Amino acid sequence: MAYLHSRRGIVRGALASVLLVSALSGTAFAQQAKEKITFAAAMFSEAGRGDRAKAWVQKFNESQDKIEVEPIAIPFSSFANTVFTQMGGGGGPDLVRFDQIDYFAAVPSGRVLSLEGLIDPSQYKFIGPDKYLAVNGKRYGVIFDSTGYGLLYNKDIVKGAPPTTFEDFLKVAKETTGDGKYGYAYRATMAERAGFWQDVCNFVYGFGGRWSDAAGNLTVNSPEVIKGIEAYKAVYDLDVIPKGADAATYRRMFWEGKIAMNVDNGGVAAIFHQNSPNLPFAAAPSPFPTPAQGLIMTMLSINANTKHKDAAVTFLKWALEPENQQGLQKAMGTIVGTVTQYSAEDLAAQPWLTVYDKQVETAVPQLVMGLETKTPEIQQIVLESVLKVLQGGENPKDAMDAAQRLIERRVLRR
């Protein structure tokens, strides 16, 4: 009998072991079955904002039992080259956060999926600049984050209301320059080429100019563009800027109380608030004849090579849900792809948010529309011509006429 009981115990133990192994195997299988997709973005490599963005992605992962998104951090300096090389080889991340130029390069080359039929635009209240994402009438991405430009000013230096006209702006800039302080700051060197372009765009757009017309024809020498360049030169000649200073330097000077005014993007306002919470600054529309200013935006797209299209679409739809858009706005500190509502606490701490919301509705991409992929080459020629005006004394009309001819011959091959 003792032998029989012993054998029964062995059988029961073996059976329990089999069941336990089976259960553990089932759990492991369930974990292995979770579909993993990758999401590449330069922001993930940034201190602070990158961590907040990863935490936002983690909220998606915690809400899902079948899909997991893995953030992939690639520094901005190598992002485009890395991602396009991977995509060209048939691989790459499933989801990509593109900047403007890279987005418009990826679409015509077939690197990203059309979202036609995958998301229903009528279900979302997209912000105004969303209209720029369509290529040949089709959508290939959604705005991930965005911001426009406005006038940031130090309330201790600029007494009373900020200037609303360009003439008043020049007057205030001159009056607030002296004793180690400057009335304004912008970029005017090729070492800061990308930022130099952004600053020039703000002046050109503010005076009604565009680099191309609605049909995509080059308009670098239009009367409105020339007015913008003349205004840029007027500020330069007034000796109210720290000439030669890069953006990092003059932005630091701003939060040190040494710069009175600066037209800059909403992300910079957030940085000022974080680095110097007691800085008495405010925001207002840029003091130009028209409200149009430059637009910074990044797009979230799906890699055409992905083997996980449904999972990628699931994440994209999750990202567009109102609650998750608000979470993204808090993580990024900028405007997101859909209209969001700010809490009273948000507006009390960051009153400039509503100013930038209004500015972004009339903002224009810092691209040569219709010639988006040619923008870097056109940008180089335009900025070299602007420097001739600023430093060489060349007439703005002559300089832009020459730029138009050079672009048509060298870039457009006409």
Image: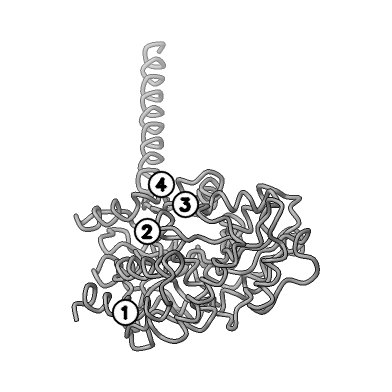
For this view, does 296 lie left or right of residue 344?
A: left
Q: Residue 158 lies in what quarter of the image?
A: bottom right
The answer to whether marks 3 and 4 mark residues whose Cβ atoms lie closer than 8 Å is no
The answer to whether marks 1 and 3 mark residues whose Cβ atoms lie closer than 8 Å is no
Which residue, as the protein is rendered here, is positioned at the far top? 2
The answer to whether marks 1 and 4 mark residues whose Cβ atoms lie closer than 8 Å is no
Element type at mark 1: helix
Q: Which residue is mark 1?
A: 404
- Front in this rendered view, residue 409 or 26: 409
Indicate the amino acid at tag 4. Ala
Element type at mark 2: strand
Q: Which residue is rendered at x = 44% and y = 64% of the image?
A: 391
Q: Which residue is rendered at x = 23% and y = 77% of the image?
A: 412
Q: Which mark is residue 95?
A: 2
Disc 1 to disc 4, how far (Cα)?
Answer: 39 Å
Indicate the amino acid at tag 1. Gln
Disc 3 to disc 4, how far (Cα)?
Answer: 7 Å
Q: Nearer the viewer, mark 3 or mark 2?
A: 3
